[in-house]
Amino acid sequence: MTLRTVLRNEWRLLRADRALGLVLGVFALLFAYALANGMAWVDFQEETLAAAREGNAERVESLETELQRIADGGRPSSPFRDPRSPSVLGGAAGAHTAVLEPGPLTALAVGQSDLLPYYYDVSIQTNESSFLQNGEIENPLNLLVGRFDLAFVVVYLLPLLILALSFNVLSGEREQGTLALTLSQPVSARGVVSAKLAFRAILVMGLALGVSLLGVLFSGGFGSPGRVALWCAAVAAYALFWFTLAAWVNGLGRSSAWNATVLVGAWLLLVVVLPAGVNITAGLLHPLPSRVEMITAQREASNEAVNQRSELLARYLEDHPELAGGVAADEANRAALAWAATDAVNRRLEEVTGVYDERLAAQRTLARRYRFLSPALLAQEALLDAAGTGDARFARFRSQVREFAERWRTFFVPAILAGEQMTADVLPGVPAFRFVDEQMREVSARAAIPLAALGGLLALAGAGAVVRLRRVTGPGS
Amino acid sequence: MSTQAVLETPATGEAPPIPVRAAEFEDPVLEARSLVKRYGDLEAVAGLDLSIQPGEVYCLLGPNGAGKTTTIHLFLGFIEPSAGRVRVSGFDVARNALDARRRLAYVPEQVMLYRNLSGLENLQYFAALGGRETLSSERLTDILVDVGLPLPAVGRRVGEYSKGMRQKVGIAIAVAKDAEALLLDEPTSGLDPKASREFSELIETLRGRGVAVLMATHDLFRAKESGTRIGIMRHGRLVTELSTDEIGHADLERIYLDHMQE
Amino acid sequence: MIRHIVRKEFTDLLRDGRFRWCAAIVGVLLLVSLGSGLVETRRAEAAHSAAQETARDHWESQGEKNPHSAAHYGIYAFKPRLPLSFLDQGVDPYTGTSVWLEAHRQNDFLMRPAQDASAGQRLGALTAAQVLQYLVPLLIILLAFGALAGEREQGTLRQLLATGISRRDLALGKALGVAGALALLLIPAAIVGSAAITVGSPGPAATPLARGTVLAAGYLAYFAVFVALSLAISAWVRSARTALVALLGVWVLNGLVAPRVAVDLSKWLHPTPSAVEFARTMEREIRSGVPGIERPDRDETAARLLAEHGVETVDDLPVNVIGVYLQESEEFANQIFDRNYGALWNRFEQQGLVHEALSVAAPLLAVRTLSMGLAGTDVEQHRHFATAAEEYRRDLMRRMNGDLAENSRTGETYLATADSWAEVPPFQYDAPSLAWVLQNRTLSLAMLGLWLVGAFLVAGSLVRRAEVA
């Protein structure tokens, strides 16, 4: 009853106040701009991926033509590019580009998708060092600053809108004198503040979620309703946190000016200073292992492997006795020897990289503990996870590409060792990459952690607000 | 010195004998027992006993700082008493503030409203908060006109209202609530004589309907006009209680000034 | 006269608890960021120089080998950290840290630190530059928003002007008072900073003190702009509260909105190709050349050499045809690389110009570009290093191919001696001079100057016209 009455009154007040309408209008524009930006980025990625897929098809087609020509009695155009050789067919000439489709909600959050590679060329030359790639071409300056996407607007600017609308939700009523009449009615201050905040929350979240859903609609993200729901939950939890914080501060019974100062300070601390402080602390206490050292280790590993080249084939065949029959036993097959050397290098690289990756993962786990200090970091994590542009989905892509490279090798290497000749008939059987996207279950399990932490912060602020507001019984002096 | 009962309240919280009246058999709507409100060392209300029956208009007179507004705020539950009890229609304000407020209407000294809304919209809002959301706009408009707001002003923004007009909206809010008790804090301050007169008539109507009215005021004339009983407060105490039937205007002024001089 | 105002403002601010708290927080953050930056830079620089030495060892200890094999083996170049990079890590986390210099290819810089960090890292790191660019202006706003609006509200402005002091003096006094309070914070930081520069300067010499001085001047100008802006708005609007809201709005636009708008605008005006497109173009051009840049042909090279030396068969030639051909291929490929990478770098530079130009709306963009430039962590200096590394690669290939061409005959198996690798000079990088940096940053310098002059003029005019009550 109180709720409906207050909502209707707030709506009237909003319509009568031009400044408030203006603020909301400006934010609607910012949201629209951010969305347009995100959608342009998705278009760019999709064009790129289309080109990559086209490249795959073209390579297969030209190999097929060449193989057909040779089968019809033609000569290979170059002895080094004879597609009948499995090391050519499975090498750069026949490489398959493994692509990661943009996350279902990339239009809402560019996230890491401008920094991390979303396609890799896979061939028999693929090894651990192939994963040291730059990803999309992007000006480092632009990477540094980041995009104006919805996630940015939600994390940085939305709290400001919320605080602008709610910093004086109770203090303003007191200062303009209406609180006395209000509280002489059978309503509690808590009820009135809740209702007033509910009104603002409906407006703000209606705007944020409405624009989000619009973005989803335009970019066809409704294919994963679970992610959309997660996104909405993250936006809602983060927004509610700020509303609750405003309620708490209002419950302290100070002036509107004081509330504004404290809330802007809180925003600055939680959104600007803490994430930066958390990042620098994590970097100092748990420095990521140096890639530079990894390069040196990789280099040494491959030097070693190359120096032992002569012993390699024998050892390789010992390890893979099933292949020994196919290899001409009298004289080492050139291709087989070359492969044996490559394989040895690859194994050593895997070892070195494995050690590095473990250390990296350990340090990152330690560093990520600090994110619980900042709702902005938590919200960003949940938003990116929901959008599919966070670190996890890219890590999953990398590991699937690793598996795919293994499949690729399993397909071509026996033929290399056996010195087989390939024909056009094998082409349809050549492995093709297909990204198996995360199950909604995994995504929600992962996003549940930041969401729960955000919920905890929300509950904390909520408890503070309830305790303080319960003490407000009158209009004060 | 006239012969009517002049009761000095004792320093302790003992209930003073109250003049026997016809209404004594009914339960009081507004009741304060040994009410104390302290702010640090200062006793804003120091052992107040008050009992107001339906159809009574009780006027609290007293200088600034005598504790009149504090008393009203105690009835509203805006502040908690340091000792003693406040009841509204039998509901303990400390325990059931909302039930108490449901039976109370309040007009503050300065009626402050939402400047960007019209008088009608303000009335709709506060009436709805008070549990009268079913009242139609026509009915609320009638109430506004009845309390003396010119019809064309009803739909205009309150920002353009004079103080008297805002005061009338405040009274309309109280009327619309149809409450058992009415708390008025300096309701006529700043009103012109005509408006003041209309106000008295309004109080008279409400009294006729059996509403219990507690009115804090400086205005001796208005108190004599509208009140059925008058209490004079000083330093948080009720120094005397008079029945308006028994005294004339001149008497009241003399008694008041006598008490202020000590 | 001004002296009295300055002293009063200064004392007033120092006694203000809010200022003391805020200044203490910003001061601590500044010192922490300086310290952590220094630790991080030294750690990285130590790793890089160790790796560079090891890379050289690898190169020298190749043993007997054909020079072209050695060219394929190549060498890694690691990007050094310049002495001032502890103040501002700039784009360093987003540029690769090392490049493999090998035959036939100009490789990309790989291993961007940001790729290993988590997404949260992109919400910013607390570097000294961030504190100076974001938090100090905020502190200035807090110090100065009420300078005139507050005095007007309290009614003291009328009283002040009644003493006969000019408004210009009043405003100047206020500005100097704020500056004095800030100095308490900035001077210790500057001392720590310059001590760090003089005591421990890792990385290649890059006139760190001169760069540091200009950097300090740039930041002082930036702060002065904020002092003037705060005074201007404080004089202009009616209440201190409105002044605060307006200034916070300016801060958000300056620090949060404008930089990201600059990103989008720069990408829209100067789009970069996708990596797929870029690689395809390069591959196509390397395979078949472009008009004016013809791909060399081994038979043609042989024929030309035969004609030049007037001999009949390649066996009679004093040079190895393969060595000559390989070098010609290198030079062909280099032209293709220059075309493509050059165009890409130019795009980046144009995008950078958009960022700088947009500083007309946000002084942060000017001071940030200047700061990264002087710290040696901007895109241009990354390019400078990349160019140096590529020149080294080209020289290395020239030497290897020359060795092959001159010391062997066509068709014979040639192995260079194990000690010949040490004759190749090691990779030595010289950071660009201060003049080079400033020349790149003229637009930012001009914009900062423009802001400084503009802000003071506007402040002067608004203070002169400010209402007294």
Image (cartoon, coloured by chain):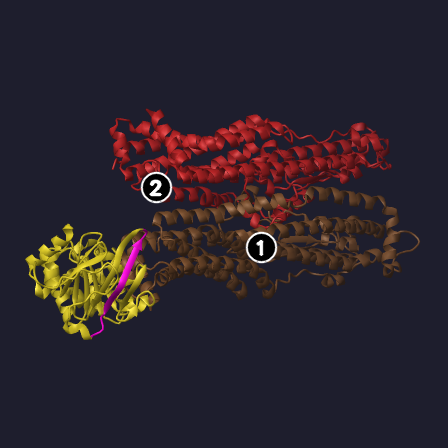
Chain colours: A brown, B yellow, C red
Can residue A410 be seen?
yes
Residue under the point 76% across and 37% down: C71
Mark 2 Cα shell of 10 Å, populated few (<14), some (14-19), many (≥20): many
What subunit carries mark 1? A
Mark 1 Cα shell of 10 Å, populated few (<14), some (14-19), many (≥20): many
State which quadrant residue C75 falls in: top right
Q: Tell me if residue C230 comes above or below residue A150 in the rendering.
A: above
Decide which of A323, A421 is in the foreground and name it: A323
State which region is magenta.
B26-40
Q: Find residue C131 and report its horizontal and vertical position in percent.
A: 50, 39
Q: Are marks 2 and 1 on the same chain?
A: no
- Select label 2 or label 1 by which is in front: 2
Residue under the point 63% across and 39% down: C291
Instruction: Report the side of C60 relative to A106 (left or right).
Output: right
Decide which of C33, B183 is in the foreground and name it: B183
Residue under the point 36% across and 50% down: A254
Q: Which residue is mark 2?
A: C243
Magenta region's main secondary structure? strand
Decide which of B12, A449 is in the foreground and name it: B12
Residue under the point 57% across and 46% down: A279
Instruction: Report the side of B101 relative to A61 (left or right).
Output: left
Q: Which residue is mark 1?
A: A390
State which quadrant residue C467 falls in: top left
Instruction: Report the side of A384 relative to B107 (left or right).
Output: right
Q: Secondary structure at mark 2?
A: helix
Task: Single out the residue that lies furthest toward the right.
Answer: A330
